[in-house]
Image: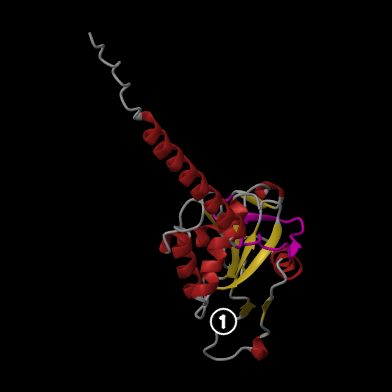
């Protein structure tokens, strides 16, 4: 009586599946390595350089509160110099700053310093700020003229002066000379950049630098 041969074992189907899984894992690993390599080779923007430090100052904001160097520690800000009766560049500068306030990173403030403190009292500055829809992180700053001009020239390294009556030009910006630059200051009261308020590309650079400063770079 013949005996039937034992049934052959069923084909093993897990090997192809393991091979597919292994190839998938290896492919994913290779992709991760490639992404990491590209990231390492990508150019990284250096933080803005330190260009100077502000001296101690004690001034007054438009809301009547003190505006001091120590009081601003830890809070970066963008600064400019204006005066409310300016018939030239000041309105354009303030309008551009009004646009920037909505794009600046959280934690970066704005400070607009008046070069005409005798006229630009806190009340006058408060009205001026409302005309430009200034938000809560934007301060308009006044104080003693000598203190303001010293801060501008010795701290920010920007021009600020009253033009003598005999040298004033008809139809000019007004009786005061000041810079049209925006200045980025970090949380340690250090100047980190100067930006042309009339140049769109420069303002984009300001926003990028402010984002780095907001991260503590």
Left or right: where does residue 192 sit relative to residue 5? right
| Element carrying mark 1 | loop
* Direction top: furthest residue: 1
Q: Position of residue 76 (x, y in %)?
A: 62, 53
Q: Quadrant of residue 181?
A: bottom right
From this view, report whether residue 210 is shown above or below residue 107.
below
Query: In the image shown, does 162 or 48 lie closer to the viewer?
Result: 48
Q: Is residue 167 visible?
A: yes
Q: Is residue 61 visible?
A: no
Q: Residues within 10 Å of mark 1 (few under 14, many from 20)?
A: some
Q: Which residue is mark 1?
A: 174
| Magenta region includes residue 18 | no
Query: In the image shown, does 6 or 63 lie closer to the viewer?
Result: 6
Q: Position of residue 157 (x, y in %)?
A: 72, 71
* Direction front: furthest residue: 1
- Please identify the dominant SS of the magenta region: loop
Quadrant location of the N terminus? top left
Query: In the image shown, does 76 or 216 lie closer to the viewer?
Result: 216
| Magenta region includes residue 56 | yes
Left or right: where does residue 135 sit relative to residue 152? left
The magenta span reads 43-64
From this view, report whether residue 120 is shown above or below residue 20.
below
Q: Residue at x 49, y 74 (%)?
A: 200
Task: State the scheme by which the image is colored.
Answer: secondary structure
Q: Residue at x 55, y 82 (%)?
A: 173
Q: Position of residue 140 (x, y in %)?
A: 55, 59
Q: Quadrant of residue 109?
A: bottom right
């Amino acid at each position: 009586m013949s005996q039937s041969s034992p049934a052959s074992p069923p084909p093993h189907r897990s090997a192809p599946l393991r091979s597919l899984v292994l190839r998938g894992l290896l492919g994913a690993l290779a992709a991760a390595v490639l992404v990491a390599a590209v990231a390492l080779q990508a150019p990284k923007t250096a933080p803005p350089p330190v260009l100077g430090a502000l001296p101690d100052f004690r001034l007054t904001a438009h809301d009547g509160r003190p505006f001091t160097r120590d009081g601003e520690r830890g809070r970066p800000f963008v600064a400019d110099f204006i005066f409310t009766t300016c018939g030239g560049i000041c309105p354009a500068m303030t309008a551009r700053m009004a646009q920037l306030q909505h794009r600046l990173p959280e934690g970066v403030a704005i400070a607009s310093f008046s070069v005409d403190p005798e006229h630009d009292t806190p009340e006058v500055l408060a009205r001026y700020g409302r005309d430009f829809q200034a938000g809560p992180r934007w301060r308009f700053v006044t104080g003693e003229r000598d203190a303001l001009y010293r801060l501008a020239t010795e701290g920010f390294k920007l021009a600020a002066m009253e033009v003598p009556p005999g040298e004033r030009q008809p139809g000019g910006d007004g009786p005061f000379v000041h810079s049209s630059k925006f200045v980025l200051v970090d949380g340690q009261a250090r100047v980190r950049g100067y930006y042309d308020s009339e140049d769109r590309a420069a303002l984009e650079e300001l926003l990028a630098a402010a984002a780095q400063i907001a991260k503590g770079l």
